[in-house]
Each structure stands twice: as structure tokens, then as C-alpha cells.
Amino acid sequence: MDESSRPSLLVVDDDEGFVEAAVTLAQLHNFESSAAPNLGAARAAMRRRRFDLVLVDLHLPDGSGFDLVEEIGHLHSPVAVVTGNASIASAARAVRLPVSDYLIKPLERARFDALLEQAQAHWSAQQPGAGDDAPCGDFVGTSAAMQSVYRQIRRIAPTAANVLLVGESGTGKELAARAIHDLSGRGGPFVAVNCGAVAPELLASHLFGHERGSFTGAVRQHRGYFEQAQGGTILLDEITEMPAPLQAHLLRVLETRTLIRVGGDTERELDVRVVAATNRHPDDAMAGGRLREDLFFRLGEFVLQLPPLRLRGGDLELLGESLLERLNRRYGVDKRFAAGTWKAIAGYSWPGNVRELRNVVHRAYILSEGADVELPPLHDAFRRRDELDGCLVFPVGTRLDLVQREMLLRTLAHFGGDKVRTAEALGVSIKTVYNHLARYSDDAAA
């Protein structure tokens, strides 16, 4: 069978016995397998191709497997870490990284089988033979609304058009961007940037890079996110949070396909696919001065709307079961949802969409004492008491971190995204606002 017709596995480990066992199990799932005994060999292998699953040992002859995991995150190859010396510190670090699973030697057969099956299903969805309506990327769901999304992603991905993703917070805009990249055939990395989580005065340097000495603190030359995404795709999330002067700079970059680093004078050619995302309606963003009209027409060569969870019908249960399965693999147990779970929450509107569902399921999973996971009673906790007075109502017992988050986000929205006025209204420093927004961004990517 031709190698291109099979999913691929890379095992990064210097333990020959373990490598042989892992490769043998993968062959039973029809994987084409490769091995690398150290970080150098692994990097060389990953420059040659993209793997559908990478299994990385944490202790390698030339360094830590975590170093490779962080690099893999930019390439968007699913990765699992494995170790013969498990520790709380390494497990905690793995949770903070884009890791599919944390495995302990000797491998538990059922758990490794499940990991391979997940990678195989993801690979199958990317194949040209897959139906246009079939799930793509890491999406879960078969609703009519999502089938439309899958069709549009498959049609736009192979083109060179810029894409603007529009959808409420938590609807999967980054998943859509990654799916577009994965199906584009572009060999470079996928780089995601949250424009709302970087201080405005630093955003230009982060995006376009800077030369040494170009400003106070620029002690060395820096390649920005655009250069890091060369040959691949860059996601500009929360594009309407980008300051207007920088939007004009971005427009020039899009039009000329070149950039000049901050403090530099050399034009550098770019080969980068641009995908932008916003949770604001483009018309409202332009009317409110949050998005330049000329930039919208450049970014929105193709506009893709992501549906909210409340409009996805039976996808709610599919998503819940998928999240529960991942938690079972992570913690090595076998829990299930209690009978009647989905009927009990049938009327809930899920204002936080899939991100909120993930948090609710994870919390219920942790708190469940037996095999049955019961979701708590759900209600729309954050409702405006009066649209005119701008008040919020928080039910007694609402977690303090949720109250804090909602107050910050609602205040920020009230002031049209002005972080300085938001900080003044809440009585905190502007640095505190940026720190909280950065943390919320990290939570969303987790």
C-alpha cells in the first residue's frame, strides 16, 4: 500500500525496545511509522513531512522532549508525550502544552489504541475522498450548520484567498483556521496571534519583528509572527482589537506581500496565508471604527460564519461525549454521563459556546465521585437587568473568577474595546487588564 494512503506516526525515543513495541502496535492500525532516537533526528524528520501523530519521550540524549513539543505546537502535528519517570511537575507542564495525551511506560495497550484511533479518524477526515459534509480538522458535529462549515472550509482551503472568520466567542474560530491550514497543502507552520492580548505599543514588533536597537529594550534582532509563519498560515485573532494605525500597516503588508521590520529599512518578501477572526459583526465593527473598511475588503475575500452551539442541534451531545472521552484518556478512568443528562439541560443557550461546554464538563468530571458524571443545573447566569442602565445580575453562588471575567469583558465591550477606559472604570492598572485578557486567551487555547 502506498505510504500516502496511510496515516503516519513518528516515535521519538532512544529506547529501541519501546520503539519496536510502539511501531508494532501502530502497524496493526495501518500506520506508516518512523523513528528518531533524538531531538536532532526528529527535527530533520519533521522538516521532510508532517506526521499525523508524534510520540515523544521526555528524556532524550540531546535534551528534553518538551522542547520538541513546543516546536510541534506551531506545526500542528498531534503530539503525545511518554515517560518512564512520571512526575507531577512533568504532568502539569504537559497539560499547559498542546499535548493529546500523557503516557507512562510501559504503554497501556487500550490507551495507546484509542490515541491511534483518534489520529486515524483525524487523518481520514482530511483525505480528498472524504465527503464535503464530513467533519474536518478537530471539529466534532454533524448538524446541518456545521456541515455547511465543513463544505466551505474544504472549498476555500486550497485557494490563496484571505479568510475572515466571524463567530461568537467559543465557536471554534481557531479550529477553523487550523483546518484551513491543514487542508491548504502549505508546508510552512500555522501561527496564531491574539491581537487583543498584546499591548498596542508592542503589537507591531510582535507581528512584523524589529531590528536591534530600534526601541528601548530591543537588545537583539527579532523575527515577528509573519516571518515565523513563512510558507504557512497566520491567524490574526480578535482583528478588531488591532489599533487603527497598525491596521493601515497590515493593509500595506497584505497588498505588497512584503514587510519591513520595526526600525529597519529592508523589505522582506512574504509567502503567508492570512486568516483573521473576530467575534464582532463586520458591519458593526466598521461602523464603530473598530475595523477599517479597506482592510475588511482585503481580509474578507472569503467570510466564513461559525454557528453558535445553540444552533447546532444534536451536536451538543456529540461534543459532550467527545470531551468526556478525552478526559477518560487523560485520567485513565472510564466515566460516563448520568442518565437524562442532556434532557436536563435542553433549554440552556450556552452563551460561552463550546468553550463553556468544555469547562462545564471538566468541572463536573472532577467533582463526580462515582462513574456517573452529572452536569450541574444550568441557567443563563449573566443577563443584563436593563439594557439602559448596563447592570449585570449574578446568581448567588456564581464562582468569583467567572464574575471577574464577565465584569471585565462586559466593561471592555461597553467602552468599545478601549482598555485604558476599562482599567479606569474598574479601578485597576492597564497592565492588569492585559494580564487577564492574556490569561483568558491561554484558557481558550488550552
Image (cartoon, rainbow, N blue to C red):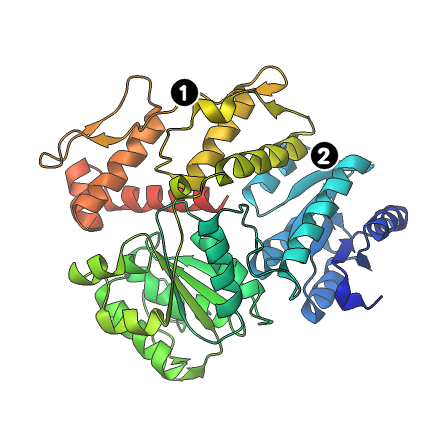
Q: Is residue 231 left or right of residue 83?
A: left
The reply to whether residue 224 is in sight is no
- Counting residues from the start of the chain, the first of labels 2 and 1 encountered is 2
Residue 194, position as x, y percentages in the image: 39, 55
Instruction: Please tell me how crowded label 1 is: few (under 14), some (14-19), or many (20+) other residues with Cα within 10 Å.
Output: few
In the rendered structure, which amino acid carries the disc numbered 1? Answer: Pro
Residue 186, position as x, y percentages in the image: 57, 72
Q: Which residue is mark 2?
A: 86
Point 63% across, 18% down: residue: 371
Residue 258, position as x, y percentages in the image: 40, 81
Q: Quadrant of the N terminus?
A: bottom right
Q: Which mark is residue 225?
A: none
Q: CA distance from mark 2 to mark 1?
A: 37 Å
Q: Is residue 381 left or right of residue 210?
A: left
Q: Nearer the viewer, residue 221 or 431?
A: 431
Label 2 with label 1: CB-CB less than 8 Å:
no
Q: Mark 1: which secondary structure?
A: loop
In the rendered structure, which amino acid carries the disc numbered 2? Answer: Ala
Point 39% across, 39% down: residue: 310
Q: Which residue is mark 1?
A: 377
Q: Is residue 424 left or right of residue 191?
A: left
